[in-house]
Amino acid sequence: MRRSERKIKKYEIILCILVLAVIAAGLLLPKTGELVLLDELCSILVIWIVCIYVVVRVIHNWKTGEKSTKTAGVIIAAVCAELCLWFTKDLAADLVSGTKPVILTDIEVRESQAHTGIFSHHYYLLGTDPQGERIRVEISADDSARMAGNKSAILVYYEHTRRAVSVR
């Protein structure tokens, strides 16, 4: 058997560095405030970069592949395109519609930590809007401490991504 002699290409190294930079930027961006959509954008960019890489690799393999490889490549490219559009739709809707102010009553502040460690610590504000709908948005640790014990809040948020711009 012949061992594969595929070498890592320069663009693959650049893509890895780009993905790590986008992830790091997402970790450093605030969870509440004017820059919350940049945090969402960082998450979406990672998905786009990975999908673009997969599609480029699939296209590269079309040149040497059989018909079944090309068919699988088309399916993989379509799935990647659908994933990118699916994850982008909420951000695009919020960019078009802008922020929405709402007065929440019966608010609760919750904290959650997933199994992945320090970067998975999240805080959420839950409340009822005037129409009776329960709204849950991610907030910062500072906002969580400030809102604990309050009965109501004025929230300015992006409706589709459920990200808070300000909480008072």
Image (cartoon, rainbow, N blue to C red):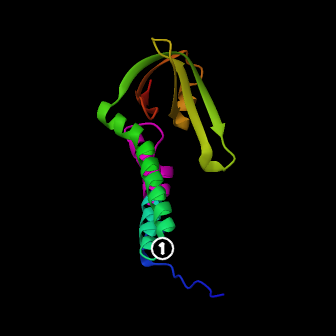
Query: Is residue 160 part of the magenta span, yes or no?
Result: no
Residue at left offset 66%, top offset 43%? 114
* Dot 1: element: loop
**Quarter holding residue 106:** top right
Query: Is residue 42 part of the magenta span, yes or no?
Result: yes
Q: The N terminus lies in which quarter of the figure?
A: bottom right
Left-right relation of 121 to 158: right
Magenta range: 23-49
Q: The C terminus lies in which quarter of the figure?
A: top left
Q: Identity of the amino acid at label 1?
A: Gly
* On screen, residue 58 above or below 10: above
Q: Is residue 25 visible?
A: no
Residue at left offset 37%, top offset 38%? 34
Q: Percent x, y for residue 15? A: 44, 67
Residue at left offset 47%, top offset 15%? 129
* On screen, residue 129 above or below 96: above
Q: Percent x, y for residue 155? A: 43, 24
Residue where numbered disc 1 is placed: 65
In front: 119, or 44?
44
Magenta span main SS:
helix
Residue at left offset 48%, top offset 40%? 31
In front: 115, or 152?
115
Q: Outermost residue toward the bottom?
A: 2
Q: Percent x, y for residue 9? A: 46, 78
* On screen, residue 145 above or below 31: above
